[in-house]
Amino acid sequence: MRRILRAISFPTRRLTGRLTEHMPRGLYARSLIIIIAPMVLLQSVVAFVFMERHWQTVTQRLSTAVTRDIAALIDIIETYPHDADYSQVVQLANQRLALNIAILPPDPLPAPAPKPFFSILDRILSEEITKRIGRPFWIDTVGNSKLVEIRIQLDGKVLRVLARRSQAYASNTHIFLLWMVGTSLVLLFIAILFLRNQIRPIQKLAEAAESFGKGRPLPVDFRPRGAIEVRRASLAFIQMRERIEKQIEQRTTMLSGVSHDLRTILTRFKLQLALSKDSKLNEALGKDVDDMQSMLEGYLSFAKGEAREETGELNLQEVLGQITADGRLAGKKVKTSLFGRPDIVVRPGAFRRLVTNLTSNAFRYADRVEIVARNAKGWLTLTIDDDGPGIPTNRREDVFRPFYRLDEARNLNESGTGLGLSIARDIARSHGGDIVLDDSPMGGLRAELRLPV
């Protein structure tokens, strides 16, 4: 039983997967499909039932009535042959039955004409003549759109009958189809208008969330609107954003106060050391005070995260030029390349600090550094390769943890706090991107930054 279920579920999953691949991914398009698909299905079922039942039944009854009239005329012609020219029969058929008949010489019937692809009249009328008259016949339902010609082989003569198409065929069916399609289009147009108004608040909410994820301000026209559920989601998002910003502001304010107090203490230490006469002790304690000052500045910078900076345009070419100058001052060989537009929208100060933290590590541990920036399809990819000692694969995520120092892998100087890469990733993620470490073709470490711009 399990094998049977697996055999059935496997092609079902494949079919579902293919349908999912070809389905539109937007909410608006999918909502339109949810509206249009049932409407089209319902219209198809109604049209099929109408054509199969009503249209066919009416056409069959009309064709039966015409066939009975023709059969009655044949009986009159064969039963009462005293009317030599059949003028009375022709007059009776024309006045009473609305049929135009004529008695033709006994010539052979014309060859059967090609049947139309879809002609319910041709099929039903042929069946009725065969069943009720039972003589050789020929019909033409295509030649004249308003008339149907019927020829029946009699004894020594041929009866030709011209009947209006409406006598044997329900010709007003297209009116029903036009009304059905017309009303469907009107309803569909109204549904699209209402659906667009309902989908637009959701799209605005998605844009606002994406902007917040990239560290950008909310769109100017964003406000809670739409259905109750969408309004609640928008209001919850606004409140969440305000709480996050308030928490960041409170954290920054608290650490700024702590930093101010600690700086006061460090200033006192420096003053006491300046008044002390022990030069050896002064040198050792002075170095400790400088280290504490550097660590304090690093902690405060990490806590701030450049959260309050506004977004703006930044020229990548200028940033790469500054990095090249810094590398050459440090005695390093630096090569930079830029592909795509140089202008990007980021928080300029935070982005400069992000790139500086990544390149400073490369300048510290390597002799050659290559930087490639690609701005294409809404994404900025910045790749930094060096020929330094690199970082073991199993410890590449650890170096992003705050205050983590990789003393065994790299010879960090004593003033390091282990916050450089943590700050860099924090800034990258606040812009909606990330940083990944990998092996470099140059033999050292590759740091790849991806940001939506």
Image: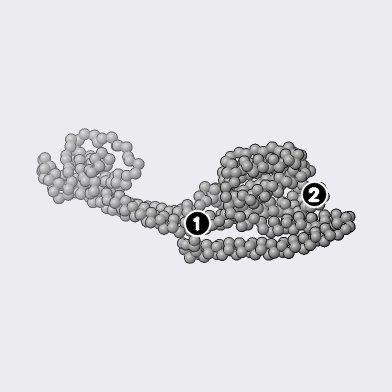
**Residue 86 drawn at (x, y percent):** 12, 42
Q: Which amino acid does label 1 sit on?
A: Val
231 or 242: nearer the viewer: 242
Residue 157 percent across, percent down from the top left? 19, 38
Query: Please, what is the three-letter code of the amino acid marked with disc 2?
Result: Leu
**Distance between the Cα atoms at labels 2 and 1?**
46 Å
Q: Which of 154 and 331 is in front in this view?
A: 331
- In the image, residue 30 sits, relative to residue 384, either above or below, namely below
Question: What residue do we see at 25% from left, 39% from top?
Answer: 143
Q: Callout 1: few (<14), some (14-19), or many (20+) C-alpha neighbours within 10 Å?
A: few
Q: Which element type, helix, strand or loop, lies under badge 2?
A: loop
Q: Which of marks 2 and 1 is nearer the N terminus?
A: 1
Q: In the image, 296: left or right of 166?
A: right
Instruction: Please indicate whether residue 407 sits to the left or right of residue 133 in the image.
Output: right
Q: Is residue 79 something one can see in this rendering? A: no
Q: In this view, does 325 lie above or below 424?
A: above
Image quarter hosting the N terminus: bottom right
Quadrant in which residue 130 is drawn: top left
| Residue in view at x 71 percent, y 42 percent | 326
Residue shown at 76% from the left, 45% from the top: 364
Q: Residue at x 63, y 54 (%)?
A: 430
Percent of width and height locating residue 228: 48, 65
Query: Quadrant of the rendered structure where residue 85 is?
Result: top left
For label 2, count other residues whose C-alpha is less than 10 Å away and answer few (under 14), some (14-19) or many (20+): some
Residue tagged 1 = 220
* Nearer to me, 258 or 380: 258
Instruction: Find numbered disc 1 in the image and state the secondary structure of the residue it sits on.
Output: loop
Is the residue under label 1 in contact with that under label 2 (CB below 8 Å)? Answer: no
The reply, left or right, for residue 378 in relation to residue 200 is right
The image shows residue 435 at horizontal and vertical percentages of 67, 49
For disc 2, the marked residue is 412
Asked if one can make out residue 190 in the rendered structure from this viewpoint, the answer is yes
